[in-house]
Image (spheres, coloured by chain):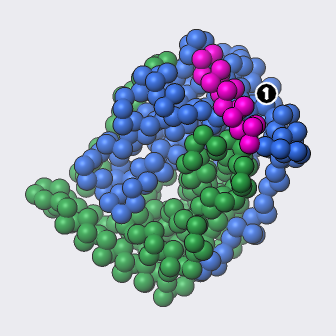
Chain colours: A green, B blue
Amino acid sequence: MPDSIYDVIHRRRDVRGEFTGEPLADDVLERVLAAAHAAPSVGLSQPWDFVVIRDRGIRSEFHRHVHEEREVFAATLTGEAADRFARIKIDGVLESTLSIVVTYDADRGGPAVLGRHAIADAGLYSACLAVQNLWLAATAEELGVGWVSFYREEFLGKLLGIPDGIRPIAWLCVGPVSRLSDVPDLERHGWRKRRPLAQAVHQDRW
Amino acid sequence: MPDSIYDVIHRRRDVRGEFTGEPLADDVLERVLAAAHAAPSVGLSQPWDFVVIRDRGIRSEFHRHVHEEREVFAATLTGEAADRFARIKIDGVLESTLSIVVTYDADRGGPAVLGRHAIADAGLYSACLAVQNLWLAATAEELGVGWVSFYREEFLGKLLGIPDGIRPIAWLCVGPVSRLSDVPDLERHGWRKRRPLAQAVHQDRW
């Protein structure tokens, strides 16, 4: 487990098809959640919460919704893109051991959140940093994580009884996997290729 | 450098006062940027770019703006909060070796970004994941990172010549540091205490 951080960062994958459903030990889950909770946050607001979902009923209901939304997206595609998308698995909600929903509470640490007066979204950014800590810690623990984003926030909020004003920002499938693929699923299916780093780096100005 | 990932995650700090300004080797910077670029992204859109800023003129101009915005925030505080805030350093723009601005391009990978039709912000989330990869890689390299958010996006976009439609989401000060503090600055200054993990974790439903 004490891999170099670069190994973990480059090995990490967005998993759909490789979940085994095997159990996940409580102490491992605790370490992964503690890693997420150690993320930086604007004004030390720590605006995230984590809903750990093992209940099969809730996961099945979410899964049905995801597949309705899959159809909504599929209907926007034609030709080759439609064919490619038809072959792509978009979630491992039922096969993974559990799911973790990460939420964002804009009121946490308010009313004057240090560092947020000029950028309303800064708190939302913090919650995302927690997601990436969780993802890397899980990868180091030989677990897979798959971020499912084919859902409507309102649906998910109601499904989990999330209070008004708190926003679900990620549904993450988590659990042991048979392996992590070397190449991202979407690249393997010809959906999109990765961009070279050099194209993304600018010096001093854009 | 091959620390355990948990060590890196828990050692990471949001640095203001500890930058030394010492040089940062090109190969280290390249590794850190490659780590950021290896982040997950919705539909493999990789919607981020990185502007590496060494130019002192640009950094000074940004620094002036940040301190104007500091005054804007300070004016919203009274009593004890105002006193506490007066003692808090909010940036290391001039003392750090360089800065990296991370941007978000909503058109990247479009028009049909897989996984984004139902959640407009999903691309923005991806760019944040890149920030956290960068931050952890830099920490493993014994560098400090400080996210400065006392600025207006419009000002920063103009300062760096960022094209319309592309949004700056983070100004990160980066460079060698004398040390990383054990306790977050804002906790040390009595601004806010960290929340226990147990309060942030829910089972099955909120």
Residue pointed to by mark 1: B18
Image quadrant where one finds the C terminus of chain B? bottom right
Find numbered disc 1 in the image and state the secondary structure of the residue it sits on: loop
Residue at the spot x=58%, y=11% of the render? B57
Residue at the spot x=69%, y=26% of the render? B67
Q: Position of residue A2 (x, y in %)?
A: 66, 50
Q: Main secondary structure of the magenta part?
A: helix
Q: In the rendered image, which quarter is residue B19 located in?
A: top right
Crowding around mark 1 (Cα neighbors within 10 Å: few <14, some 14 to 19, many 20+) is some
Q: Please state which of residues B114 and A5 is positioned toward the viewer in this rendering.
A: B114
Residue at the spot x=64%, y=44% of the render? A116
Q: Is residue B154 magenta?
A: no
Q: Position of residue A143 (x, y in %)?
A: 54, 63
Q: Position of residue A66 (x, y in %)?
A: 36, 73
Please state if A88 lies on the left or on the right of B165 as rendered. Answer: left
Q: Is residue B130 above or below residue B49?
A: below
Q: Please state which of residues B78 and B122 is positioned toward the viewer in this rendering.
A: B78
Could one spot residue A131 in this view of the protein? Answer: yes
Please state if B175 lies on the left or on the right of B161 as rendered. Answer: right
The kind of residue on which mark 1 rests is Glu
Q: Position of residue B160 (x, y in %)?
A: 47, 22
The magenta stretch is B60-76
Could one spot residue B6 in this view of the protein? Answer: no
